[in-house]
Image (cartoon, rainbow, N blue to C red):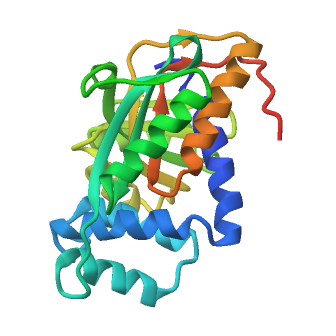
Amino acid sequence: MAGHSKWANIKHRKARQDASRGKIWTKVIREITVAAKGGPDPDDNPRLRLALDKANAANMPKDNIKRAIEKGSGTGETGALEEIVLEGYGPGGVAILVEAMSDNRNRTVSDVRHVFSKFGGNLGTDGSVSYLFNKLGIIHISKDFSEEDLLEVVLDAGAEDLVDEGDYFEVITSSTDLSNVLEALKTKNIEHTNAELTLRAETSVSLDQEMSEKVLKIMDFMDELDDVQEVHTNAEFPENFEVKE
């Protein structure tokens, strides 16, 4: 799973910037709405609990959160949001997988296809790249805590690994064990700065500086589409890759 951190860090930086403008709210509301289809109680719905964590981190008003939960669980205004996964190839032959939520599938597919075409990629068929990715749980924890103590807590709770990412520790879990690990951290009063279910590729495509810039551009444009929730790639950016602001 090499090379994931550069894009992940870029996305987290962008998320902080977007949150300050309130732009991230739309995506979080969609996530809450769809997650709430599995039930309105976050204690019984791990996906909803993660979505609510994102909402709180983005300082979303409680009324917005309540309406999204009611809409998704069928107790409020109904909607027709559909989860859509689109797959394709970007510059340099890297795999790109797009997770979207939309009330108009044709519009979403058209928008994503346009970005692929505009930046030298192409939209693929279902299954063309998804087999490269695994769903994992990811938790970020500040370095205020001891690595040795953290390792004991998260491994006992079912985590697969603890990685030193420089500015923070990253806990990696299976998608099914994420809730157990979060609960164990809560019991030990260990706070996390980010927790999510994500997709990561087992194998990656190494890029040079020039190709990295091209791939980052298509990823950025894809991520900015209104219906797009998450964008994943198997691109491996160079360690010394400088992101142009």
Count of numbered tags: 0
Q: Can residue 9 be seen in this view?
A: yes
Quarter of the figure with residue 182 = bottom left
Instruction: Report x, y in % for residue 140.
Output: 52, 46
Q: In which quarter of the image is the N terminus?
A: top left
Instruction: Report x, y in % for residue 212.
Output: 69, 20
Q: In this view, does 21 lie to the left or right of 69?
A: right
At 78% from the left edge and 32% from the top edge, which residue is drawn? 243
Q: Please, is residue 176 above or below residue 202 in the view?
A: below
Q: Is residue 236 left or right of residue 190?
A: right
At 83% from the left edge and 34% from the top edge, which residue is drawn? 244
At 59% from the left edge and 21% from the top edge, which residue is drawn? 120
Q: In this view, does 48 lie to the left or right of 193?
A: left
Instruction: Report x, y in % for residue 104.
Output: 33, 59
Q: Can residue 165 be seen in this view?
A: no
At 66% from the left edge and 40% from the top edge, which residue is drawn? 10
Q: In which quarter of the image is the C terminus?
A: top right
Q: Is residue 44 left or right of residue 2?
A: left
Q: Please, is residue 185 above or below residue 216 in the view?
A: below
Instruction: Report x, y in % for residue 55.
Output: 48, 71
Q: Along the line of sight, which residue is nearer the eye, 148 or 38?
A: 38
Q: Along the line of sight, which residue is nearer the eye, 41 or 128?
A: 128
